[in-house]
Each structure stands twice: as C-alpha cells, then as structure tokens.
Amino acid sequence: MTSPDPSVATDLAGEERAASDARLIDMVRRGNRAAYGELVHRYENKLKRTIYRMVGNLQTSEDLTQEAFLKAYDRLSDFDVSRRFGPWLFQIGVNGAVDWLRRSRKRAAVSLHQVRPDGSALEIPVDDARDHLDLSQEVQHVLAKIPLQYRTVLTLRDLEGFSTSEVAAIVGREDATVRWRLGKAREMFREIWERREGVRT
Amino acid sequence: MSGKQPTGDCRRVRPLLALHVSDDLDSSEQIVVTRHLGGCRDCTAYLESLRESHRVLETIRMLGQEKPAQPTLWPEIERQLPAAPRPRVRPAAWRVSTWHLGSIAAGLLVAVFLTDGSEWLRRDLPRTRVQGNVGDAVPIDHSLFGPLGINTQDMDAGLARRIGLPSGRGVIVVDVWTKAAARHVQPLDVILAVDGVAVTDKASLIRLSQAHPAGSPIRLDLWRDGRVIQREIRLDTAPRPQADDDLRVRGTHAWWTDDTV
C-alpha cells in the first residue's frame, strides 16, 4: 500500500503535500497513486458527511463515498484541471447517492408534502428519544424530513460550504433553480426545527 | 414570529429572506429586502427565526470541521484501484467535430491539388520540374535516389527568413523517397549538419554523405518547427521508394532535381 496515513507523509515530500488539487491530479495521471491518496484524504470526510445526509445510513455513505472515489479515479483522464476537483468529485458522489436511493426505492426523507394512501397529510413525527441526541443527530433527524432535492442543496451550501454556483454544478441545475431550492430548503428546515422545539418545550 | 398573514409585499419578499441570511442575494434583491424590512415587523421577526435555524446549521458545519479525523477509506480504495486511470475518451461531439474538420481539410487539399495549388504551396522552393502532371502515372527512375533517399534544395536568404532559420545556411528537404528516410526526415526539414560538420549547400551534403560507406549510420542536425533536433539515419545501399517498386505520381506533381541524395 502506498500511503495509508492520512497525511500521506510517507510517500509525498513536503512540497508535494502542499500541492494543489490540479498538481496532485497531474501526479496521479503520471502514475503516482499516493497522490490520489492525498486527494482521498482531503475530501473523504466532507463527501461522506454529504452522502450520509442524503441516504441516512453510515455504512451506505461509506460505501458510496468509496465508490465515488473509484469512479473519479477511473474518469480522471477526462477531468478538466481548469475546473475545481471538489465540485466535480461531489457531482459524482451526489449522483451516486441519488442513483442508490432510486435503486433501493428507499427514501431516507419523509417528504413534507407526502400524503398517506388515504389522502390525509402526513404529520411530522416527533421522536421522544431525541432527548438524548446531540445537536448533530437532531439536525440529521430534521434534515431527513426534507425532500431529497432540497436537502442535497441545503447540505452542500450550508453544511459543506460550497457556493451556490458550485452547488449548481454539482447537482446539474441552473443557479436560479439552486437558489430557489436553497430558499425553500431553509424555510423547511426552520419550520421543522421550530416545530420540534415547540414540542420539546 | 407574528401569526399575522403576510401582505402582498411580504409574500414577494419572504422567499428572499431565506437567501438573505447568508448574503446569497444580488444587489437589487438586497435593496428590495432592506427597504421592506425597514417597515415590516413581521418579516423582521420571520428573518430572525430563519437566522436562528441557520445558526444551527452553521454550528454543525463548524463541528464537522473540528471533528477528529475518522479512519480513512484510502486503504480499501487503493486496493480496488486499477493500475492507472483509463485513457481519455473524447466526447462524441468532439469526435464528430474532428471528423468534420478532417473532411473540410481533405476537401481543401483536393481543391488545392486540382487547381495546381501544390505549386503555390511550394513557391518558395527553387526547383526543377522534370516530370509529371496532375493525374499522371509516371514510373520513377530509382537510380535517381541517393543513399539518403531524400531530395533537397539549397537554402537562400529569403526562404531562411520566412521559415525563421537564424543561420540562413543548410539545405531544405523537398521530398522524402524511402521508408528508411521517412522515419527520420520530413519535407521542409533543413539539414544543418552531418555528423557535426556544417552543411552549406547540396554539394557539401552529397560530399559528406558519400564519405560514409553504404549501410553505415550518420547523424543529421535538422531544423524543424523552429528548433534543432538530431536524427540518425542509415545510408541505404539500394534505396527503394516508400510505396512500392513501381512508385507512381498520383494526383500531384513530382518535383525533381538533379541533386537527389
């Protein structure tokens, strides 16, 4: 194994550790696998968190993250180094998560607009067990109730810090669409979060 | 937040408030929102509740950044990596584009040759036209090939200036007639030296090449694409044309001089 260490210190010299993504990609293309290890280290936690917010399962998010890195490696020759690697990688990861959700026909979220088969509106469930959850888990509970397309935008913009134009590139939508979804997603989050606070108090 | 129903203005502004919490508005939207908030307590309260929930997300973001590193996926990823990323595959659109460009280029070449454009292309090269017309099939006399299998012309000052040759010396390759020569030399190469000895004209190239026994290698200093390169070429004992023993001129003229080497 070339470099299991997160810092990839064993195979990359100090100068190379500080290299930009583009430089690392160039090194990978020339056969340096350890350079790809550095890219994995840079993005794996962020990508895993994003995918976890989408699919709601830790093991699945790890599997899908791994799959995204393998796909990215396979397509690395097609990557345009004038673009940023992060959004490109996340596009692969997010698409993989969406495909997985479609395949499994299992939505991690319960849509706010979902209705029961009898036509009645679905109430947002209140889980008393959440008293012992930490803030991160509580947020995850709330996010899981937001429809996927809104949740993905909210996660990328507010939890992972991508710009709206980067989010647009990742999800393959126009900037205006992303901004609209982002506004809606924040409103949904506020509504569910406040309702949950109201129930708890 | 107030329980009052939002007014028409409020309904127009509310969708923007969720973007206002993170400065995702453009300047004109910003002005609209700021003006409205100045006179609307309901929307100001609504904005504050949006900010509160947004602060929760910001907190989570900061917590995520501060989390200790988790076990890396790299060992498992590396185990499954192929030896190298697959070679680049051009998108279909690009392939089509290349195909079209190739067709255009081929069409232009045909047009050039049909209009005797080859003469125009080579107007800078002094030469003696000895045989052949468009479409003629003319057997070539193999005895005309010298041991290098190429055809050259002397360099002159005007041509040297046009191709950016600083020294202005050497001989320019007009045609390449053998497979062996074609591996190393191209038309419009300028031969500057043979085995380190400067070539000043065709006579010196002939003299220098004949100084070597047949079958022996000689090193050529060539001027190509604005830089000097070196190529080693083996002198042919019985030069043969590139195509077959019955090389014929097809669709173009054969430019010939009596100084083939």
Image: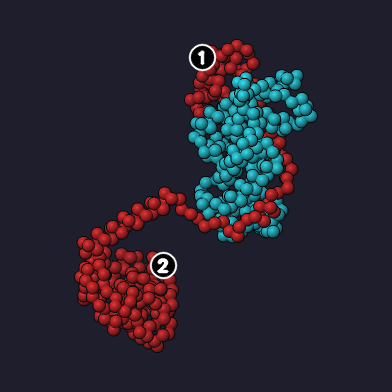
Chain colours: A cyan, B red
Q: Amino acid at mark 2?
A: Arg
* Residue on which the image places disc 2: B227
Q: Amino acid at mark 1?
A: Gly
User: As rendered, which of A16 and A200 lies closer to the eye?
Assistant: A200
Q: Which label was assigned to residue B8?
A: 1
Quarter placement of the N terminus of chain B: top right
Left-right relation of A194 to B171: right
Q: Is residue A18 visible?
A: no
Q: Is the residue at mark 2 from the same chain as the one at mark 1?
A: yes
The chain letter for the residue carrying disc 2 is: B
Measuring 28% from the left and 61% from the top, which residue is drawn there? B109
Which residue is at a point 73% across and 47% down the rendered structure image? B71
Q: Quadrant of residue B86?
A: bottom right
Residue B97 at x, y = what percent?
38, 51
Classify mark 1: residues with Cα within 10 Å, few (<14), some (14-19) or many (20+). Answer: few
Q: Name the side, left or right, on which A182 lies relative to B77.
A: left
